[in-house]
Image (cartoon, rainbow, N blue to C red):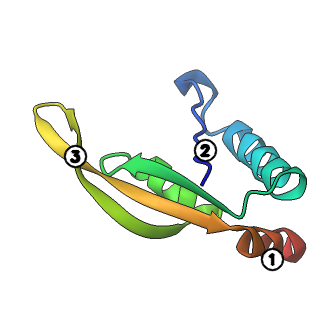
Amino acid sequence: MPRCSVVIAPAFQQQGYGSQVLTLLLDYLYNFSVAHNISNWIEDWNAPALAFAEKFGFQRAGVIRRNSYRAGKYHDAVVFDLLRPEWKERRHAA
């Protein structure tokens, strides 16, 4: 299962670049490859990234406990996934 991530430099965040990049990436993967399920892992402290994944229709699929160590404590990673039919439905509804 392919994993994808989008990282935008702070100076360019909140300008729509992340949405454009992820839309193009998902369109490519679901239209020109055999990918059926794409996942990403987001650290639990990253609320903007969690909301961004959910905005695109990614579903919470699980948690990797104590996946990273940051600022003196362990953090979980939230696992998201998005199936090809879910993405196609969202694109046709838009």
* 38 vs 48, nearest the viewer: 38
The residue under label 2 is which amino acid type? Cys
The residue under label 1 is which amino acid type? Glu
Residue drawn at x 89%, y 74% as measured from the top left:
92
Judge whether residue 54 can be spotted in this image. no
Residue drawn at x 75%, y 40% as measured from the top left:
21
The residue labelled by disc 1 is 89
Please tell me whether residue 25 is drawn above or below residue 10 in the rendered image: below
The image quadrant where one finds the N terminus is bottom right
- Give the side of residue 8 with respect to residue 68, left or right: right
The residue labelled by disc 3 is 75
Please tell me whether residue 9 is drawn above or below residue 19 in the rendered image: above
* Residue 28 position in % (x across, y down): 84, 48
The residue under label 3 is which amino acid type? His
Work out whether mark 3 precedes mark 2 in sequence or the reverse, and give the earlier one. 2
- Give the side of residue 21 with respect to residue 2, left or right: right
The residue positioned farthest toward the left in the image shown: 72
Q: In the rendering, which numbered label is found on residue 4?
A: 2
Residue drawn at x 74%, y 57% as measured from the top left:
35
* Residue 72 position in % (x across, y down): 10, 32
Q: CA distance from mark 3 to mark 2?
A: 20 Å
Work out whether mark 3 precedes mark 1 in sequence or the reverse, and give the earlier one. 3
SS class, disc 2: loop
The answer to the question of whether label 3 and label 2 lie on touching residues, with beta carbons closer than 8 A, is: no
Q: CA distance from mark 3 to mark 1?
A: 33 Å
- Give the side of residue 75 with respect to residue 3, left or right: left
* Residue 3 position in % (x across, y down): 58, 47
SS class, disc 1: helix
